[in-house]
Image (cartoon, grey):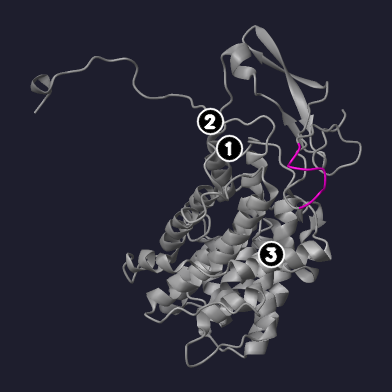
C-alpha cells in the first residue's frame, strides 16, 4: 500500500495553486492535497459490493474514502459524534494517542514547548514552516503594530453588563473587529492574510485583558510595544495606572508553554467548528469567533475550570485526597476525577508531562501556600501511585496542570477558557486558511439517519385533544 503524502513531504504528488507570486513568502505557499492510491476497500451491502479508495497519510494513518458511497449505493455511514470519521486531510497537526505523540507541522511538541516562542510557533502553524529571522522580526512587528483596539470599540464593551462572561465578550468583539478591516479577508493575498492573522492574534489578548478589567471595574491598560507577547498580556491583565506589574520570568515561561501547548490539537470540537464555518466561505473573523463559542462549552474549554471546581468542592466537604480517590474508584458513586485521562490520548498526555515540571517550578518560585493547590498535588501523588489509575492509564492531562498554574498566577477561573482561546488562535487561523485555500472547496454538510415520525397529515387545532 503506497502512502498518500501531504504538504512538505519528499516525493510528493503536488497539485500546485499559485499564491500571488513565485517567491515563498508568508501566505504564498502552494496547496498540496492527498491523492488516493490504487488500493481499495470493499463494502458489501446486501448482495452488492462497492469498492472504496484507501487513503494513507504520511504517518501511516489509514482511511477509507467514502466520498462517493451515497452516490454509488444510496447508503451513508453512521458515526455518532464523528469519533471514527476523518472530516478532512490536514497538514497541520499529527497526534498518536496510543504513543502519546503530538507534533505541529512535524515538530515534536516537547521541542517547541522548551525551545520555541509562542509567536514563532504561531507562525509555524499558520504558514507551515519555522520563520527565518527576517520573517520572525516582521511578524513580531506586525503584532506590535496591531495590538491596540480601535477606540470606537470601547462602546462595544460598554454594552455588556459587568458580569458578562469574558468568552461572550471575546466572541462578539472578534466579530466586531472584522468590521474595521473588511479588505483584509482574502486568503489568496499574502499581504492581506498575514495582516489579518497578525491583527487577530495581537488584538485577542487586548480584548481578553479589557474584558477582565471591565469585570472588576478597573480601567483598561494599554499595551506596551516594547514588551513581548506574553509579558504584554500579563501587563494588560494585572498592571494598574499607579502600579505596573512586573511578571516573574518563570511565570512568563509557564504561560508561554501553556499557550504553545494549546496552539492546536487536530480536529477537536472548536477547530472543526472553525473549519465548518470557514467552508461556507465565512470570513476569518466570523470563523474564529464561532470557534470561541464552541470552546466555551464546559466539555471542551471548561475542562481546567472543572478541575478547580472539583478541588473547591473537596475542600468545602473537608475530605482528604485519599477519601476522594476512594469514591472515584467506587463505580456506584458516579464521582469523576477531573483532569485525568483524555479522549484522544491512551497514554500520558505529552503536554501534561511538560506542564508538570513548569507547575512545580512556578509553585515553588512563587512560594504560594494555597490549600487548593496543596490538595491538587495530593490528588496527583495519590492517583499516580494507585494501581486502579495505572492499569487504566488515567494520567493527569494538560487541563489538570494548566488550571493549577493559572490559579497560582492570579488568573481568575472565568478567564481560563479565554486563555485557552488565546493559545488556540494560531491553530484556528491555520485551519481556516487550509480550508480557504483548498483546490476543491466544498461546504461541509454532514448527513444523518432520520429516526423521527413517518409521514402524517396535519390535524386542525379544533380537532386536536384539549
Q: Quadrant of the N terminus?
A: top right
Which residue reaches farthest top?
Answer: 47
Q: Nearer the viewer, mark 1 or mark 3?
A: 3
Residue 212 position in % (x across, y down) = 44, 74
Residue 205 position in % (x across, y down) = 55, 68
Residue 99 in the figure: left or right of residue 281: right
Above or below, 144 against 362 in this view is: above
Q: Nearer the viewer, mark 1 or mark 2?
A: 2
Q: Quadrant of residue 79?
A: top right
Residue 20 belongs to magenta span: yes
What is the number of the mark on residue 260? 3
Q: Residue at x 51, y 83 (%)?
A: 238
Which residue reaches farthest right?
Answer: 11
Residue 379 belongs to magenta span: no
Residue 359 in the figure: left or right of residue 91: left
Q: Nearer the viewer, residue 179 or 158?
A: 179
Q: Are marks 1 and 2 in contact (CB under 8 Å)?
A: yes
The residue pinned by badge 2 equals: 446
Above or below, 309 against 55 in this view is: below
Q: CA distance from mark 3 to mark 2?
A: 31 Å
SS assignment at label 3: helix
Per the rendered image, the range of residues in magenta is 18-25
Amino acid at each position: 500500500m503506497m502512502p498518500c503524502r501531504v504538504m512538505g513531504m519528499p516525493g510528493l504528488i503536488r497539485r500546485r495553486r499559485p499564491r500571488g507570486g513565485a517567491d515563498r513568502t508568508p501566505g504564498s505557499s502552494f496547496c498540496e492535497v492527498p491523492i488516493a492510491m490504487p488500493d481499495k476497500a470493499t463494502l458489501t451491502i446486501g448482495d452488492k459490493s462497492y469498492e472504496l479508495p484507501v487513503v494513507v497519510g504520511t504517518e501511516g494513518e489509514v482511511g477509507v474514502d467514502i466520498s462517493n458511497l451515497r452516490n454509488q449505493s444510496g447508503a451513508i455511514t453512521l458515526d455518532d459524534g464523528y469519533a471514527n470519521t476523518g472530516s478532512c486531510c490536514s497538514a497541520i497537526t499529527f497526534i498518536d494517542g496510543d504513543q502519546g505523540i503530538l507534533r505541529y507541522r512535524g515538530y515534536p511538541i516537547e521541542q517547541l514547548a522548551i525551545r520555541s516562542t509562542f509567536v514563532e510557533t504561531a507562525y509555524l502553524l499558520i504558514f507551515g514552516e519555522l520563520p527565518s529571522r527576517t520573517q520572525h522580526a516582521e511578524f513580531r512587528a506586525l503584532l506590535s503594530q496591531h495590538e491596540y483596539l480601535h477606540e470606537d470599540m470601547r462602546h462595544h464593551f460598554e454594552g455588556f453588563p459587568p458580569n458578562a462572561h469574558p468568552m461572550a465578550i471575546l466572541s462578539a468583539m472578534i466579530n466586531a473587529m472584522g468590521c474595521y478591516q473588511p479588505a483584509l479577508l482574502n486568503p489568496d493575498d499574502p499581504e492581506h492574510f498575514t495582516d489579518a492573522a497578525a491583527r487577530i492574534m495581537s488584538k485577542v489578548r487586548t480584548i481578553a485583558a479589557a474584558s477582565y478589567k471591565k469585570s472588576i471595574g478597573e480601567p483598561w491598560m494599554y499595551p506596551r510595544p516594547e514588551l513581548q507577547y506574553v509579558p504584554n498580556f500579563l501587563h494588560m491583565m494585572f498592571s494598574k495606572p499607579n502600579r505596573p506589574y512586573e511578571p516573574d520570568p518563570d511565570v512568563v515561561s509557564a504561560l508561554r508553554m501553556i499557550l504553545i501547548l494549546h496552539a492546536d490539537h487536530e480536529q477537536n470540537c472548536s477547530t472543526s467548528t472553525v473549519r465548518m464555518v470557514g467552508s461556507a466561505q465565512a470570513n476569518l473573523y466570523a470563523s474564529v469567533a464561532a470557534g470561541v463559542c464552541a470552546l466555551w462549552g464546559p466539555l471542551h474549554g471548561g475542562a481546567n475550570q472543572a478541575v478547580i471546581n472539583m478541588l473547591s468542592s473537596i475542600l468545602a466537604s473537608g475530605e482528604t485526597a485519599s477519601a476522594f480517590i476512594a469514591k472515584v474508584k467506587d463505580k456506584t458513586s458516579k464521582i469523576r476525577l477531573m483532569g485525568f485521562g483524555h479522549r484522544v490520548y491512551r497514554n500520558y498526555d505529552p503536554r501534561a508531562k511538560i506542564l508538570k515540571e513548569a507547575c512545580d517550578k512556578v509553585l515553588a518560585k512563587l512560594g504560594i501556600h494555597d490549600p487548593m493547590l496543596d490538595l491538587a498535588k495530593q490528588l496527583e501523588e495519590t492517583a499516580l501511585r494507585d494501581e486502579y489509575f495505572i492499569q487504566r492509564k488515567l494520567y493527569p492531562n494538560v487541563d489538570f496542570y494548566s488550571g493549577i498554574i493559572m490559579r497560582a498566577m492570579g488568573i481568575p477561573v472565568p478567564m481560563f477558557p479565554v486563555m485557552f482561546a488565546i493559545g488556540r488562535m494560531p491553530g484556528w487561523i491555520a485551519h481556516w486558511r487550509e480550508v480557504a485555500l483548498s483546490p476543491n472547496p466544498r461546504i461541509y454538510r454532514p448527513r444523518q439517519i432520520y429516526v423521527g415520525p413517518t409521514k402524517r397529515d396535519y390535524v386542525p387545532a379544533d380537532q386536536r385533544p384539549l
